[in-house]
Image (cartoon, rainbow, N blue to C red):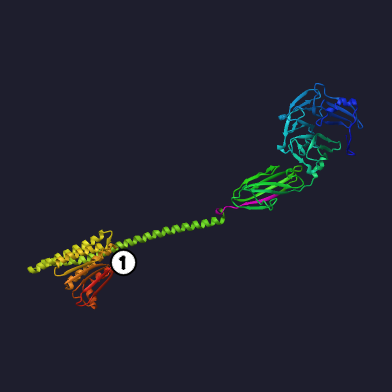
Amino acid sequence: MLQLSTKRTRPLKLTASIAAELQTERIYFGNRMMWLAPDTMLLGTAANVFRCVFKGNNLVSTTALLSSDKKGFINSFYYATDKTFWISKVLPILYRLNKEGTLQTIQIPENYLVRSITEDGQHNIWIGTDKGLCIYTASGKLIKRITTEMGLLNDCIYSLLPATDKSAVFASSNLGLSYVSVAGKIKNFSRETGLQENEFNTGAAIRTKNGRYYFGGVNGITAFYPAALSFIVDTPVIHIIKLVINDSLYNSSAGTWEGDSVLLNHNQNNLRIDLAALGLLNANEYIYKYRLIGFEKTWQTTYQPLGINYTLVPGTYILEISCSPILSEEKSFYKKFVIIISPPWWQTWWFRITAVIFTIGLIAFILQQFNHKKYLRKIRLLQVQQQIQDERERISRDLHDDIGAKANMLAYNVSLLNKTISVQDLKQVKTRMKGTSDDMMQSLRETVWTLKQENITTEDVWTRAKNFIAKLQQTYSLIHFTIEESEPVTKKINYNQALNLIRILQESVNNAIKHSNCKTIFCSRLNVGQSVVFTVKDDGLGFDTSLVSDLLTEGNGLQNMKQRAQESCFVFSIHTAPDNGTTITIKV
């Protein structure tokens, strides 16, 4: 027996007859006691439930309450206010015996052993098992089960006492003491809040008439008034005790993550967070609520805030955390942390602005290049058109100057035929007409030949010049023609240059025949470095260079030769003196 005034225990002395009836050798820690009055107690043993009457500190009488057919190894019992016995035996079966003697058998969920039974203020029957709490109505209907999944510290319930509330109990377990309501509200207490130890004993609980509760455990007895429990002062500080980024510990040198914000790169977006409240209680004796603004809107609730995982896109997030002691949920403590995931460089504002400017510049450049190319094509088209026009004018000029003049000469000779002339003059007219027509045909052939050729070389022009000289040699037998040439080279010229070159050579030979009164005409084609030099030389009369301007006006073709050479970018030179012949050189 425990003397409350002295807080000392002493053995209870029993008479031999009472000890024999109670079978004290079969009283185990699981059998319980229940006081009905200050001097009357119900005592459960392995054999039966007894009404025990005390006088002072002595047990004076015992009476067995269960009939022989209902007794057996009693594990726990409770005598309800409606005079109904709730009895559990070693088997996972609960018996309900009403005052009329009707026995009801109730199967315990999942066949777990019953350790304690009590009744709350609403006359609900609470059953403490090795797997949490079962709540029944007074008639034996199961209301609900409460386990660690709902917030209990431990599922092994040792003792139960009704709370001062009408529908709640205090339950001792292997890991502490819990206040539990039918509605599911749970407040947990541990050694750090003043308990003798976290582990208690089966059936070791009592409530005195002054409202004080006693729970026995492995290290003594815990005593308290329920109304005083809410006065525990605790101001925990919330910390992120571990931050793991991409499977690597962030800031591993520090015990906790200091500061209220963290800046991470875009590829540091896989986060695992461990939270803890550092206060008077253990970290697992707080209830935590958290949410990540920018990622989720609803609050998450947990008792073990470890391994909280997020995979985030670049942006700014606010981790809001609140916690409160399990035994005092109305008091909450708040903290927030800012998590910034920087965007990759290609998603930054400065890159986007640069990209827009670059794109605009590129489009402008492409449009400028397109318009420039369009302009160049138009210029080239105009140039081609101009070249065609120039070529038309040149051909027209050649035809007019050369063939036109010969046609006029031919027309003049034809007009002479209509007049009365001598036979000798007629022969001369016919001879001139034939020569003129031959010259016209030769000019046309040269023009057509140059227009038909795509690729003309200086060697092609020299070959035609030699053919021209060969024909003249047959006509002018008194003049000796000499031709000199070096190894042929392939130097390409355009058709206009070819036509000008052949005309200059023909004109030079014709002038020597017609005006120089020469006996020898020397023609050559020599290679000088990267150039080809053509020479026409005669041993005729020559002329005074001071009279060249006068000669040009007389129509002997020197002016035309000079213009053709200048037009074709040839180097044209003439060397002459009276009685010393004439030498014309064309450098291509």
Q: Position of residue 169 (x, y in %)?
A: 78, 36
397 w.r.t. 363: above or below: below
Q: Please give left or right for residue 96 compared with residue 386 in the image.
A: right
Nearest the viewer among 36 and 297 is 36
| Residues shaded magenta | 335-346
Q: Position of residue 561 (x, y in %)?
A: 25, 69
Q: Position of residue 267 (x, y in %)?
A: 59, 50
543 w.r.t. 483: above or below: below
Name the quadrant containing residue 40.
top right
Nearest the viewer among 30 and 43 is 30
**Quadrant where the C terminus lies?**
bottom left
**Residue 340 is one of the magenta-drawn residues:** yes
Please name the residue shown 85% across and 31% down the image: 35
**Residue 294 is one of the magenta-drawn residues:** no
Q: Please give left or right for residue 259 compared with residue 212 in the image.
A: left
Q: Position of residue 500 (x, y in %)?
A: 25, 66
The residue that mark 1 highlights is 530
Name the quadrant containing residue 468.
bottom left
Nearest the viewer among 84 and 197 is 197
What's the amino acid at mark 1?
Answer: Gln
Q: Secondary structure at mark 1?
A: loop
